[in-house]
Image (tube, rainbow, N blue to C red):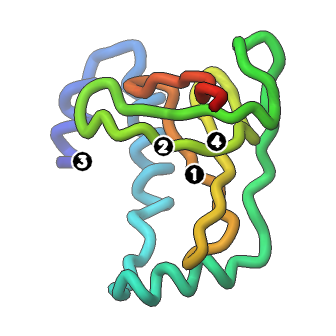
């Protein structure tokens, strides 16, 4: 696969950039997966001490602490409700509370997802 990527870019003005990027990706690797049950995964989430720092960028149509839903536009179509804690051109982050997992932040890409203000009852 690596040779295919380099061959595809051979002769391109981006050949050197492709070679460097491939080197970075190979050095990063795939991480290490750890098999665990759903009960174990919930315990890990509930025991997490810190949440990733995120911020809501201004001018993107939503404000921090708004009640929102995020819904995939191409499959599933099940909305996820939460409080907006992070928003950029690439990502939306909702804070949610779950009795089993505790307070979590759910990260979604902006592409392929619809953001809506939650309807007030």
Where does the image place residue 100, in percent across and percent down from the top left?
55, 78
Disc ID at residue 2: 3
User: Is tag 2's residue or tag 4's residue first in the polypeptide sequence?
Assistant: 2
Residue under pointer 4: 93
Query: Alpha-carbon distance for marks 2 and 1?
Result: 9 Å
Where does the image place residue 15, in percent across and percent down from the top left?
37, 25
Nearer mark to the viewer, of 2 and 3: 2
Disc ID at residue 106: 1
Query: Alpha-carbon distance for marks 3 and 4?
Result: 34 Å
User: Is tag 2's residue or tag 3's residue first in the polypeptide sequence?
Assistant: 3
Q: Are marks 2 and 1 in contact (CB under 8 Å)?
A: yes
User: Is tag 2's residue or tag 1's residue first in the polypeptide sequence?
Assistant: 2
Mark 4: give few (<14), some (14-19) or many (20+) Cα within 10 Å.
many
User: Is tag 3's residue or tag 4's residue first in the polypeptide sequence?
Assistant: 3
Query: Please, is residue 85 above or below residue 106 in the view?
Result: above
Q: Secondary structure at mark 2?
A: strand
Q: Residue at x 73, y 20 (%)?
A: 62
Nearer mark to the viewer, of 2 and 4: 2
Quarter assignment of residue 49: bottom right
Where does the image place residue 24, in percent across and percent down from the top left?
50, 50
Residue under pointer 2: 80
Query: Please, is residue 3 above or below residue 26 in the view?
Result: above
Q: Residue at x 48, y 60 (%)?
A: 27
């Amino acid at each position: 696969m690596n040779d295919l990527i380099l061959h595809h870019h051979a002769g391109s003005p981006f050949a050197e950039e492709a070679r460097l990027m491939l080197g970075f990706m190979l050095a990063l690797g795939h991480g290490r997966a750890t098999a665990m049950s759903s009960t174990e995964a919930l315990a890990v989430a509930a025991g997490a001490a810190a949440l990733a720092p995120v911020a809501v960028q201004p001018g993107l149509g939503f404000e921090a602490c708004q009640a929102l839903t995020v819904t995939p536009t191409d499959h599933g179509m099940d909305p996820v409700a939460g409080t907006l804690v992070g928003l950029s051109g690439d990502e939306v982050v909702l804070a949610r509370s779950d009795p089993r997992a505790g307070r979590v932040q759910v990260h979604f890409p902006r592409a392929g997802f619809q953001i809506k203000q939650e309807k007030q009852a």
